[in-house]
Image (tube, grey):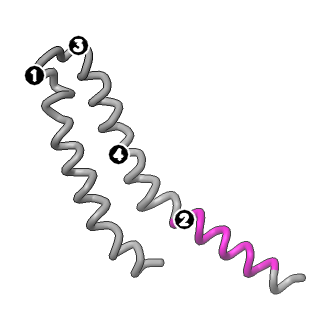
Amino acid sequence: MIDAGRKRARPIVMTTIAMGAGMTPIALGLGVDPSFRAPMAIVVIGGLITSTFLSLLVIPVVFTFVDDLLQWLRRHM
């Protein structure tokens, strides 16, 4: 689990930073028609941060808990 986290962390973080950097000017209202595009860019950046947090922290923890539970059930049944 730790090895998989190390291998996947870099590409996930790099993708998040690249997408966030690309959306930042739009979120700040630079460019054409900021009133229409800025809220969408803010939501995209929030979604990127949320998905990064979920994929790097929450999902591995849930997987570990479920795996431990299954091992415990196998031993006691």
Please give the residue where the numbered disc 2 appears in the rendered image: 61
Task: Work out whether 42 lies above or below 33.
Answer: below
Q: Nearer the viewer, residue 26 or 58?
A: 26
Residue at mark 4 to residue at mark 2: CA–CA distance: 18 Å
Element at label 1: loop
Residue at mark 4 to residue at mark 1: CA–CA distance: 23 Å
Q: What residue type is labelled 3?
A: Ser
- Estimate the x, y position of residue 76 in percent, counting from the top left: 86, 83
- Estimate the x, y position of residue 25 in percent, counting from the top left: 13, 31
Q: What residue type is labelled 1?
A: Gly
Please give the residue where the numbered disc 3 appears in the rendered image: 35
Please give the residue where the numbered disc 4 appears in the rendered image: 49
Element at label 3: helix
Report the residue at 67% width, 68% height from top: 66
Residue at mark 2 to residue at mark 1: CA–CA distance: 41 Å
Question: Is residue 44 found left or right of 20 in the rendered image?
Answer: right
Tell me the chief SS of the magenta region.
helix
Task: Work out whether 74 lies above or below 62.
Answer: below
Q: Which of marks 4 and 2 is in front?
A: 4
